[in-house]
Image (cartoon, rainbow, N blue to C red):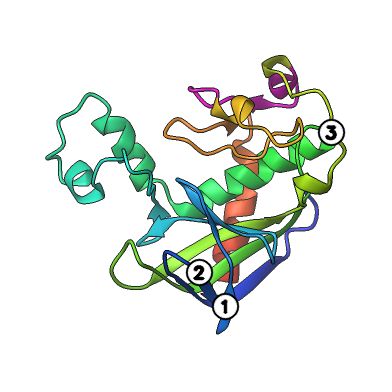
Amino acid sequence: MDDLDVEVIDKVRLWPSHASVDGHLRRVKWGAWAVYLPGSQLKLMHAVAGRQHCIYYKAPRREEVLGGFDKRPSAPDWARAFETPVLRRVAENWVMFARLHAAGLGPEPMGLVAVRDYRSFFSRGRGITAGLRLADLTKYPEKAPCTEEELRAAGILPDRSRASLREQIRGYVSDLNNLHGAMPEDGAAEVARVEAALARALGR
């Protein structure tokens, strides 16, 4: 947690089949809350207007939730998720992956990344986003799956649906994001420090 250097990428464009990073084409693997660029070992959070976004096909429409038109019981939870600053959620991920790696339960977080000019096929206009470079878990030695007890001992509060525990790679936690995503326990100060570093890198 001592080194908070942030790599800044000027321009990212996302299409359903690929990405362009400062003009260079990249393969992509899509997740509900983030996109992974395997060649760069880069996970970028989905964002709309600098706020967290989800492209899962069962997710409600952002405009309807934030406009108060979606009346399903989960609408307030979706509103909270869609209003979360993307820099904050990336900071939370960074703190959690640092804890997981230190406990031997997750990939090494290798660097913070901020994107100045971000456009995606699922939103209008330009914005910002951020992410982190993570070590490739497919090259890690196989181990027994991480348990909830181990996750909590590492200082991570699991996501409500326990997807982070069900969807492991070679016994390591690889994804922390969900409608009720995993969170670092007592991590507010660490998260604020990382979020501030990301904001500074973008001149905010």
Q: What's the CA distance linking mark 1 and mark 3?
A: 32 Å
Among numbered discs 2 and 1, the one appearing first in the sequence:
2
Residue that numbered label 3 is attached to: 142
Q: Is residue 153 magenta?
A: yes
Q: Position of residue 77 (x, y in %)?
A: 33, 31
Q: Is residue 118 above or below residue 56?
A: below
Residue that numbered label 1 is attached to: 25
**Other-residue count near label 1 (Cα within 10 Å), few / some / many at <14 / 14–19 / ≥20:** few
Mark 2–mark 1 contact, CB under 8 Å? Answer: yes
Among numbered discs 3 and 2, the one appearing first in the sequence:
2
Dot 3: element? loop
Residue 128 left/right relative to 123: right
Q: Hey, which quadrant is residue 146 in on the image?
A: top right
Q: Is residue 167 above or below residue 32?
A: above
Q: What's the CA distance linking mark 2 and mark 1?
A: 7 Å
The residue furthest left is 69
Residue in the picture at 39% in, 54% down: 51
Residue 86 left/right relative to 22: left
**Other-residue count near label 3 (Cα within 10 Å), few / some / many at <14 / 14–19 / ≥20:** few
Q: Amino acid at mark 2?
A: His
Residue stretch in magenta: 150-162
Q: Position of residue 66 (x, y in %)?
A: 22, 45
Residue in the picture at 33% in, 61% down: 122
Dot 2: element? loop
Among numbered discs 1 and 3, the one appearing first in the sequence:
1
Residue 185 visible in this rendered orientation of the protein: no
Residue 140 left/right relative to 65: right
